[in-house]
Image: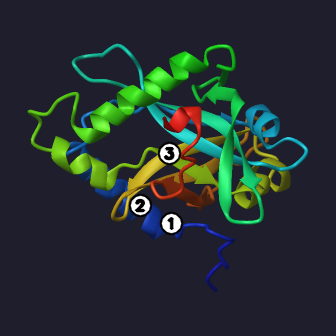
Amino acid sequence: MTKKLKRDQLPAAKAKNWRQNFEEEKDKTFNLKVPKIILQKATYEALAGENENRVRVYLGLEANKEDGKYTLCAFAVSAFLLGSGDVYADYETPVYKLDKKNIDFSNSTQAAIESIHLYRKWRSGELDAEDPGAAYRQYIYPNAYLLTKFELHELFVAQKKDEAVIDFGIEKTMSVIISGVSATLTANIDEEPEEFDFSVPCPPGCDERSIYNS
């Protein structure tokens, strides 16, 4: 009997296909290094707050190249429902860099913005216009992802995971694939992870007034 998928849970075969597409795209349009991107439970709790705000993840680049390549990074902010519509606006702080250990960048918002701007120069092909794949990046890679609160609640509260791993795959454009990780020694290492795609990419899901989307 086929196990019923949870809301926005990716079937394993689809997640595998998306990852394969992304690996193939690395040789064509994606010339960045991709480290592990982690959203920790404490960061999620700080961003969601009592109002259970949503989390928006902006993509950025490290300032320095490594082996001739830039390295992808990510920053997370809290996004709240603006009015009665379906528009979510960013709080300027707190903002966290989603490294292996999340780093509070609330006192370094300008550094976060510069990293995001650098990524957008790469995305538009401005950094390396001579690269044959540069012209196509803007059609494949978004600026940011607005995550829903339901599945983050599933991973961090219902499943009591300590971290959410943010991975990438491509259907037509790059999507996030998120799964929970437990740090406890009792975790079943043979258990197949539940993987989700529950984001709205930017564009179109952007906050045009946000300092991080300037």
Quarter-of-image position of residue 173: bottom left
Residues tagged 2 and 3 counted as in contact (Cβ below 8 A) = no
Q: Residue at x 91, y 44 (%)?
A: 50
Residue with the mark numbered 1: 12
Instruction: Tell me where residue 212 appears, x and y as whole percent.
Output: 54, 33
**Quadrant location, the N terminus:** bottom right
Residue with the mark numbered 2: 16
134 horizontally vs 42: left or right: left
Task: Check disc 3 and give the amino acid type.
Answer: Ala
Name the element at disc 1: helix
Residue with the mark numbered 3: 144
Q: Is residue 137 visible?
A: yes
Q: Residue at x 67, y 28 (%)?
A: 95
Instruction: Tell me where residue 182 appears, x and y as whole percent.
Output: 73, 41
Task: Check disc 2 and give the amino acid type.
Answer: Lys
Number of the front mark, 1 or 3 = 3
Q: Residue furthest bottom?
A: 1
Task: Check disc 1 and give the amino acid type.
Answer: Ala
Q: Residue at x 61, y 82 (%)?
A: 2
N-terminal of the two: label 1 or label 3? 1
Name the element at disc 2: helix
Question: Disc 2 to disc 3, how far (Cα)?
Answer: 22 Å
Name the element at disc 3: strand
Circle 3 Cα neighbour tier, 10 Å, few/some/many (<14 / 14–19 / ≥20)? many
In the depicted view, which residue is nearer to us: 85 or 197?
A: 85
Residues tagged 2 and 1 counted as in contact (Cβ below 8 A) = yes
Q: Residue at x 68, y 71 (%)?
A: 7
